[in-house]
Amino acid sequence: MFLKRLISLILVLSFIKALLVYSQTSIPLDKYLDLKKFGTSDQEMILKEIRKDFVNKEYKKVIEEFEKIGLFLRVNAEDMFLLSQAYLYTGNPEKAIDLAERTQSLKRGTSLYCEAGLLKVKALLILDKKPEAEKVLRELKGSFCVEEFKEKMNILESIAKNKIWEEDLSSKLLKEYLEELYEDRFNYLILKGKTKEAEKLAFEFINLTGDYRRGKDFFFKLAETYFKFGKIDEAKKYYQLIITEWDLTKEATISKFRLYQITYEKAKIKELLPPKTLEDLLMFITQIKTKYTEDKDLVEEASFLEIKVNFDRKNLERVRELSKEFIKGYSQSKYLSEVKKLYCEASVLIVSQYFLGGKVKTLREIAENEDEYLRESACGDFYYALGKEFFTYRIYGVSLDYFLTAYTYNLSKNNIPDLYLKLAYLADLYGETEIFKLLWEKVNQNLKEDLRSSPFFLYLKAKSIMDKNLKEALSIIKNLPYEKDFILLRKELYYKAYTKALEDKNYALAYEILRDSSFGNDPNGYILILSETLDRAPDFFEKILKEALEKFPQNREIRFLEVYYLTKKGDLKKSKEIMETLLKEKDYFSFYAKQQQKIQNLTQRVQEIVY
């Protein structure tokens, strides 16, 4: 029983300890508990890598690795001091002071305690806090540290008091400390964006040390900082200086790249840039991507620029290829959203090109195989463009599939109204009345001005109001274009309007529709209205018959209706003449003519008997 209670108590205390650690961090509890699973061997491996980077003077990499996982490492005082130095050398003296103080608290009475104190003094000098630096030095001088580090303390004290030329100091150590402090303060000013102060410090350093070769590092950082803050003229000045004085170096190569980049980005109309300029820019991008892979930020930026340049050069397949590589390799990049946008735009632009080039199969393969990239890029526009092409060629089943996919992949707002319109048309085509009603409502809610003249909108609107307002529907039909693709739509609507007018016994309106150029050249239209008016409106029938015979004198159906009308009217002589002509024609219609002739002969005999 006691053992169980003891185990429970240990578990509770462990949980409380975890909560206390969690309360001192800014990450969620679940993540903390999960990441605590790092084993000792893993931690040692990570620390070993960090130490290796420090020896190679890759201080930025040291900090990046530590900031990723350092919170969960059991960092000893030595590693903490190593990290404080990395922060100092990369322009973050505040963080360096914090870690140096932690190191001191862990290593009281040791040499490391003194070294951490000296680092704190350097950091305060970099921050231009000389009184605080002198105070720390006094504390160190009053401690056991003075025995081992007296010379270093004296040098730092003389620097803090601006008395470096008045003291009897080791010139080698003084030079080392001065160079280190100048460089670290320069990095600090650069990080803070204080370019003018950094510029002044760089020239002071060169004058003080006489080491002009070191100017390359200072001037390159200045150029990059000016470029970052958009001060292009100042940046160009230093890039050109580096190319002139230190050609064939990494900094010179990057400077050349930057100058081409500036020329490219400054051009308002990229198409007017000389092809050689763009080719050279792409060449430097390739060099950076292959030779300077350790500079990840630069490679990332160059990769992004390569995509932009190829997009402007209309190398759409290259854009798509590079974009997919970028999306896969730089999932946290600040350029990612722009790359996805360019990938999507390039994918949309190839649709019409590939259709014209007969590469329809390739497009369908892209839609299937690049689904992940298209979804991640929210590129519903690609599927929409693909659907539009199939829609144009009246392959409606395939277009419908792509339209529905487009809608689920975050289609651009500009394309949504047209998508609703085309879906409404397809719903109407397939007889999906309820779906059509819902979509038609969406069409009208999202209607854009340019869609008001769309043939498909006019078609659906005319069709939807025809039963209630035939005249308004007709006025809409008249606005439909006479282009080849829409002739069938016009004919369909006119036929519906025509039959509706006949159904309503509005023969005058039906006749008006009949005479429309796109419908009146069809004899079937005349046959239909003649059949309707033969018994119901004889006067109207006679007027239309005359016109029909003038337009279609050889049409047998119309001539047969004429015979029927003449017989009914009692004009047997004329109807007989027409019938004899029809009897000579060798087809199915002569049968009806013979039947009609029998009726005529019988009628004539009856008349003779009566009269």
Image (cartoon, rainbow, N blue to C red):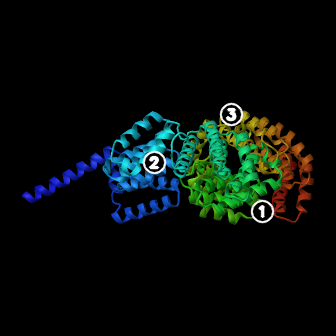
Q: How dense is the environment of label 3, judged by Cα within 10 Å: few (below 14), some, or many (20 and up)? A: few
Amino acid type indicated by mark 2: Lys
Q: Which residue is mark 3?
A: 469
Q: Which residue is mark 2?
A: 152
Disc with the residue nearer the chain's start (1 vs 3): 1
The label nearer to you, 1 versus 3, is 1
Label disc, if present, on residue 357 of the rendered structure: 1
Q: Are marks 3 and 2 in contact (CB under 8 Å)?
A: no
Q: Is residue 510 above or below residue 175?
A: above
Q: Are marks 1 and 3 in contact (CB under 8 Å)?
A: no
Q: Residue at x 88, y 61 (%)?
A: 583
| Lateral position of residue 96 relative to residue 464, left or right | left
The answer to whether residue 591 is visible is yes
**Disc 2 to disc 1, how far (Cα)?**
76 Å
| Lateral position of residue 36 relative to residue 561, left or right | left
* Nearer to the camera, 219 or 26: 219
Give the percent coordinates (x, y) of residue 138. Answer: 38, 39
The answer to whether residue 393 is visible is no
Give the percent coordinates (x, y) of residue 411. Answer: 61, 47
Q: Residue at x 63, y 41 (%)?
A: 204
Disc with the residue nearer the chain's start (3 vs 2): 2
Amino acid type indicated by mark 1: Gly
Q: Locate the C terminus and report the quarter of the image it occupies.
A: top right
Amino acid type indicated by mark 3: Asn
